[in-house]
């Protein structure tokens, strides 16, 4: 009977977020409506990926679905998508108090070989009722109110934080609902995995090179770390969140700001890492303290287990004092 009780008490993502929002007496359910439209987009992408849609079409299709769902939600004013050169400003009759930055299909070059890919999103609130401007999305990550990703892999999993911890929801295709399966995810304080594209090693700076060397040839006699690199940020970050370790996309001589985008890759993943007890560092500062000047700006990123990131921070700080 107990099992049945469990089976009928469905903690869907909508119920979970409604529950969270009930802590804000003034909440009118706007965030819940916004999130349900992001969830709709994720369900669409999950179904299209599983149908084996080819990459080119899926890139554009998924962006279309997210933009249309977010605009029609009536809860957004400015949207930034990896797929669109310019920001989308919602027409006044449909405006709401949220601004959403997202990558509808991150890692899409991996689609055609079946490797996991994902949607990444971050949410800001717009604190004024004037005409929205680009300034409403050129804000530091420390002003984000929520962030998350959806990973399209062997299962479809949405990982979300609204500022009170990190929670994982798995899509039950028979119900078409995301069900809470991983409440309150905490990243291990230290891990034994490092995740980086070693193919860029010849272009790394000193501290990155030294840190990776330490992972491979530990000085203190501890076992070498394992290298795990999928090349799809959502997959690499999801593994880091659950197993611990460090994910790095450093600057290099070819790309002085690294490759990953601040608004819809670095900020959402940094937000989640901090909420899970980890941290995220740009090589110079806390990632969430960056203030982007352009919507597609890039930044180097070192994120994951708290102690692992502390180690590379120490190397970077030491390097600054030396130069
Ligand atoms: P590289 C995918 O193209 C992506 O944007 C991220 O998902 C991923 O972490 C990174 O680029 C991989 O880049 O240069 O190692 O192939």
Image (cartoon, rainbow, N blue to C red):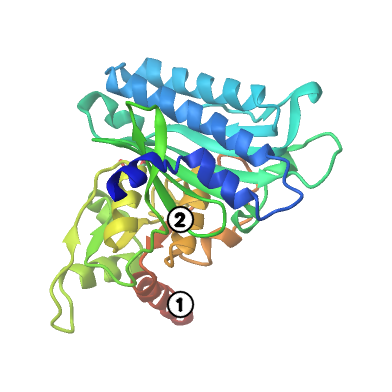
Residue nearest the viewer, comparing 23 with 301: 23
Q: Which residue is mark 2?
A: 166
Q: Give the structural element (helix, strand or loop) at label 1.
A: helix
137 over 88 or under it: above or below: below
Q: Is residue 262 visible?
A: no
Q: Earlier in the sequence, mark 1 or mark 2?
A: 2
191 over 114 or under it: above or below: below
Left or right side of 73 for 189: left
Query: Which quadrant holds residue 129?
Result: top right
Q: How many numbered callouts? A: 2
Q: Residues within 10 Å of mark 2 (few under 14, many from 20)?
A: many
Q: Residue at x 43, y 22 (%)?
A: 44
76 over 184 or under it: above or below: above
**Disc number at residue 149?**
none
Residue 170, percent from left and from top = 35, 40
Residue 288, percent from left and from top = 56, 59
Image quarter for ligand 1: top left
Left or right side of 323 for 231: left
Q: Give the structural element (helix, strand or loop) at label 2.
A: loop
Q: Which residue is mark 1?
A: 317
Residue 219, percent from left and from top = 18, 81
């Amino acid at each position: 009977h107990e099992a049945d009780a469990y089976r009928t008490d469905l903690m869907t993502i909508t119920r979970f977020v409604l529950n969270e929002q009930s802590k804000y007496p003034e909440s009118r359910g706007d965030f819940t409506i916004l999130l349900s439209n992001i969830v709709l987009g994720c369900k669409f992408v999950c179904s299209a990926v599983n149908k084996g849609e080819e990459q080119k079409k899926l890139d554009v299709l998924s962006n279309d679905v997210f933009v249309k769902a977010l605009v029609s939600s009536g809860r957004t004013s400015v949207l930034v998508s990896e797929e669109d050169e310019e920001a989308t400003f919602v027409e006044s009759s449909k405006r709401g108090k949220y601004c959403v930055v997202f990558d509808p299909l991150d890692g899409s070059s991996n689609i055609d070989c079946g490797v996991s890919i994902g949607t990444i999103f971050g949410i800001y609130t717009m604190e004024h009722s004037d005409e929205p401007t680009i300034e409403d999305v050129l804000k530091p990550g420390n002003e984000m109110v929520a962030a998350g990703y959806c990973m399209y892999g062997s299962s479809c999993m949405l990982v979300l934080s609204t500022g009170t911890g990190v929670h994982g929801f798995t899509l039950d295709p028979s119900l078409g609902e995301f069900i809470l399966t991983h409440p309150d995810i905490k990243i291990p304080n230290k891990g034994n995995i490092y995740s980086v594209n070693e193919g860029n090693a010849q272009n790394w700076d000193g501290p990155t090179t030294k840190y990776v060397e330490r992972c491979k040839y530990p000085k203190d006699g501890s076992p070498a770390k394992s290298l795990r690199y999928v090349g799809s940020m959502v997959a690499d970050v999801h593994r880091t969140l659950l197993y611990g370790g460090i994910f790095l996309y450093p600057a290099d001589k070819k790309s002085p700001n690294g490759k990953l985008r601040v608004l819809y890759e670095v900020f959402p993943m940094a937000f989640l890492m901090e909420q899970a007890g980890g941290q995220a560092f740009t090589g110079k500062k806390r990632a969430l303290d960056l203030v982007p000047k352009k919507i597609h700006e890039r930044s180097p990123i070192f994120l994951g287990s708290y102690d692992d990131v502390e180690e590379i921070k120490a190397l970077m700080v030491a390097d600054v004092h030396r130069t």
